[in-house]
């Protein structure tokens, strides 16, 4: 299902965790179990996870929108996986690699990055 998201849709959550992933990236592939463990650990704890693939414009068929949808189904992830074709999320958070994690919290009516880096 295609849907556009705004980060402020999640402003009432304790935390918003954005993880940049790639289908072809060998490091992203190595982190699938850790990512799933995070989902399990924080289930029911008012933490919203979003996965973001900013690689769909790379020309690599393994990074296409269709391949991303198939990969998320294959992995059984039950969190939104966003396609960042215009690089708004990549540029806004200054993501440079996959996987890369950003934790945001609500502070003074703004979402504030409190962690960025490795999972």
Image (cartoon, grey):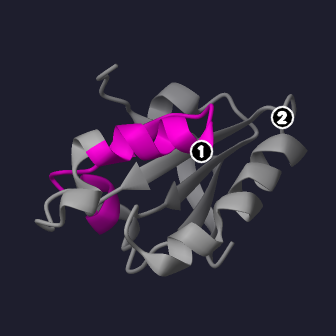
The image position of residue 97, as x and y in percent, is 42, 79
Closer mark to the observer between disc 1 and disc 2:
1
Where is 32 relative to 5, above or below? below
Crowding at label 2, few (<14), some or many (≥20) Cα neighbours within 10 Å? Answer: few
Residue at mark 1: 75
Please tell me in which quadrant of the rendered image residue 113 appears. Answer: bottom right
Where is 105 relative to 113, above or below? above
Q: Which residues are magenta?
A: 67-91
Instruction: Judge from the rendering whether residue 46 lies leftward or rightward of residue 59; answer left or right.
Output: right
**For the point 54% across and 53% down, which residue is it?**
18
**For the point 62% across and 31% down, which residue is it?**
78
**For the point 75% across and 63% down, which residue is it?**
34
The image position of residue 45, as x and y in percent, is 87, 34
Residue at mark 2: 43
Residue 44: in magenta span: no
Secondary structure found at label 2: loop
Q: Quadrant of the C terminus?
A: bottom right
Q: Quadrant of the N terminus?
A: top left
The image position of residue 98, as x and y in percent, is 46, 73
Where is 97 relative to 46, above or below? below
């Amino acid at each position: 299902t295609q849907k556009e998201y705004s980060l402020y849709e999640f402003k009432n959550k304790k935390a918003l965790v954005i993880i940049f992933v790639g289908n072809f990236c060998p490091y992203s592939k190595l982190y699938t179990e850790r990512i799933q463990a995070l989902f399990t650990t924080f289930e029911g704890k008012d933490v919203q996870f979003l996965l973001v693939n900013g690689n769909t414009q790379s020309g690599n068929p393994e990074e296409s929108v269709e391949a991303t949808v198939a990969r998320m189904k294959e992995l059984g992830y039950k969190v939104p996986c966003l396609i960042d074709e215009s690089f708004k999320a990549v540029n806004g958070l200054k993501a440079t690699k996959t996987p890369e994690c950003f934790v945001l919290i609500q502070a003074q009516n703004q979402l504030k990055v409190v962690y960025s880096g490795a999972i």
